[in-house]
Amino acid sequence: MSNTLTRVAVVGCGVISKNHLYALNKLTTVQIVAVCDIVEQKAKDAADAYGCRYYTDYHEMFVKEKPDVVHICLPHYLHAPVAIEAMEMGIDVLCEKPMHKDLEGARRMKEVSLRTGRRLGVIFQNRYNSGCRLAKKVLVSGELGKVKGVCGTVMWNRDDRYYASGPWRASYETAGGGVIINQAIHTLDLVRWFADSDVEDVHATVSHHGETHAEVEDTAEGVIYFKNGIKGLFFFSINNVCDEQVQVSVYCEKGKIQITGTEAVITLNNGEVLESTPSHETFYGAKSIYGVSHVRQIAHFYRPGNEAETTMTMEEALKTQELIDMIFKSSAKSD
Ligand SMILES: NC(=O)c1ccc[n+]([C@@H]2O[C@H](COP(=O)([O-])OP(=O)(O)OC[C@H]3O[C@@H](n4cnc5c(N)ncnc54)[C@H](O)[C@@H]3O)[C@@H](O)[C@H]2O)c1
């Protein structure tokens, strides 16, 4: 095997790790050298599937394997400590969303990346969906005139079985939040990306309306006032009876972009359809509602410069984390 291959390790062999390992395995420039999970059987199963070594202690894996890159697929409260330890040891990081459970940890990650010169990528794969890429292209082209408003909705179902399958998801201490930081973070990121502006102010509420015993919020709604005058609107709930397709609407002077799941339709004010994405993107990995684009973002991480218009940088991930922080603070003010 060529010694120019990038040596990659994955920490956390739970639900989302399957998308990472699948995507990594498709890359000819990458070698999966090891995986790690505190549950030995999970680590062993992943190692057997991908023909690599396994560990139950990530520190030991970093020391023994000296990977070039580590993918972090861990509960939110472990993102900053593991990412920081890796970067301090000279290892680049590709971390699952969010950067961390809270803004302070996310800011520390950025500081360490800048100080050590190690790359820090954060997975926001929905920016790589065909519909989102088409939407961004049309917005940048100016064909629809100025953006006036952006609206995002997530109506999914997460019940006590979901929280039982990963108890870390149920508490503020380990997850940092519920629907906002765990499910709808992608949609908030898209609203911000399409508005293409820093946030001036947020008026929002987060609450727990449903039957689950989780401590974290299951509902969030609010208005985002962007510095460029665009108004963002959002409604997120995990009390639905099923997982509905995520909707993002972008209202422009000359028409509207409607994103449903991974697809987009661009309509002019006279009703004429300007452009749309082909449907039927192939689903793979864990769950189709997570989008189909881990493969694209992970390939992009290993081929910097590719698809520059959809780059998800550490700075962008931090801005979305700042927006989440503003939403929680706004809600706390109105209590
Ligand atoms: N991008 C997406 O669409 C998407 C979808 C789902 C989850 N995620 C994110 O992926 C991350 C993981 O979520 P998940 O659903 O896979 O969770 P999970 O609970 O299924 O997996 C986490 C794994 O980490 C392991 N673990 C815990 N502590 C560890 C430690 N100290 N060392 C090694 N392993 C340890 C657990 O045993 C578990 O197997 C979270 O950040 C989550 O938000 C992203």
Image (tube, rainbow, N blue to C red):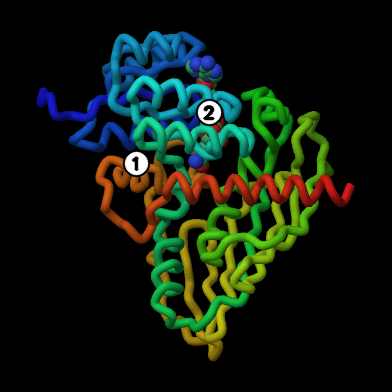
Tell me what residue is drawn at x 30 percent, y 56 percent: 307
Q: Is mark 1 within 8 Å of ligand 1?
A: no
Quarter of the figure with residue 301: top left
Pointer 1 local density, CA inside 10 Å: few below 14, some 14–19, many at least 20:
many
- Taking the image as shown, residue 306 lies to the left or right of residue 28, namely right
Residue that protrudes farthest toward the left in the picture? 2
Amino acid type, callout 1 = Ile
Q: Nearer the viewer, residue 286 or 141?
A: 141
- The local secondary structure at tag 1 comes to helix
**Which label belongs to residue 109?**
none
Give residue 104's position: percent from left, percent from top: 62, 35
Amino acid type, callout 2 = Ala
**Which label belongs to residue 298?**
1
- Residue mark closest to the camera, 1 vs 2: 2
Q: Nearer the viewer, residue 96 or 315?
A: 315
- Compared with 189, 121 (above or below) is above
Tell me what residue is drawn at x 40 percent, y 41 percent: 284
- Taking the image as shown, residue 212 lies to the left or right of residue 19, namely right
- Compared with 183, 91 (above or below) is above
Give residue 46's position: percent from left, percent from top: 38, 19
Q: Which residue, given by chain and number where applicable, does mark 2 sit on?
A: 80
Give residue 219's position: percent from left, percent from top: 76, 47
For the question of whether residue 22 can be seen, the reply is yes
Give residue 257's position: percent from left, percent from top: 52, 73
